[in-house]
Image (spheres, rainbow, N blue to C red):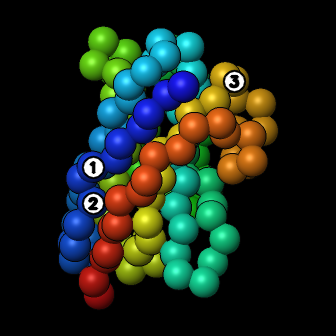
Amino acid sequence: QVQLVESGGGLVQAGGSLPLSCAASGRTFNNYAMGWFRQAPGKEREFVAAISWNGGTTYYADSVKGRFTISRDNAKNTVYLQMNSLKPEDTAVYYCAARGSLVNYNSPAAYIYWGQGTQVTVSS
């Protein structure tokens, strides 16, 4: 079992930046690939970014590529999402998730463990 807790959400103006963190506890963190997803009201949960167990491989949704950066610190059992140049359409609840590999990395169904989410609101 892995417990995930996101933090860092809030309200930010368009063009601003916001760092998110996801702290993991339970089973060995560096056994898991990690992903960030988001869900806006009335929309399906969508993939944002993913990172391999050692941080050597990363993937991004086209909508955030060049603006968001995913990283991890296995010594701290934490994965991060640095969000820059934020847009109103980035407004959503952001979730981190864990799984054993990066196969089908952009599918929510492929992830085993989920955090409770943190709200990000970008004002225009």
Which image quarter is the C terminus in? Answer: bottom left
Q: Check contact, mark 2 vs mark 3: CB within 8 A.
A: no
Q: Are marks 1 and 2 in contact (CB under 8 Å)?
A: yes
User: Are there few (<14), some (14-19), or many (20+) residues within 10 Å of tag 3?
Assistant: some
Label 1 element class = strand
* Numbered mark located on residue 78 in the image: none
Callout count = 3
Rendering quarter of residue 25: top left
Q: Where is residue 33 in the image (x, y as percent from the top left)?
A: 58, 26
Which of the marked residues, 3 or 1, is nearer the chain's N terminus?
1
- Residue 56 visible to the viewer: no
> Residue at point 56% right, 14% down?
31
Residue 19: x and y, percent? 26, 49
Q: How crowded is mark 2: few (under 14 residues within 10 Å), some or many (20 or more)?
A: some
The residue under label 2 is: 9
Cα gap from disc 1 to disc 2, whole angstroms: 6 Å
Residue 108 spot, x, y in % from top left: 69, 50
Residue at image location 34% in from the left, 54% down from the top: 83
**Residue designated by label 1:** 7
- Name the kind of residue labelled 2 in the image: Gly
User: In the image, what residue type sits under mark 1?
Assistant: Ser
Specify the farthest residue to the bottom: 124
Residue 81 in view here: yes
Amino acid type, mark 3: Ser
Q: Which of marks 2 and 3 is nearer the N terminus?
A: 2
Q: Which residue is drawn at 35% across and 59% down?
A: 118
Classify mark 3: helix, strand or loop: loop
Residue denoted by label 3: 101
The percent position of residue 3, horizontal first and vertical second, equals 44, 33
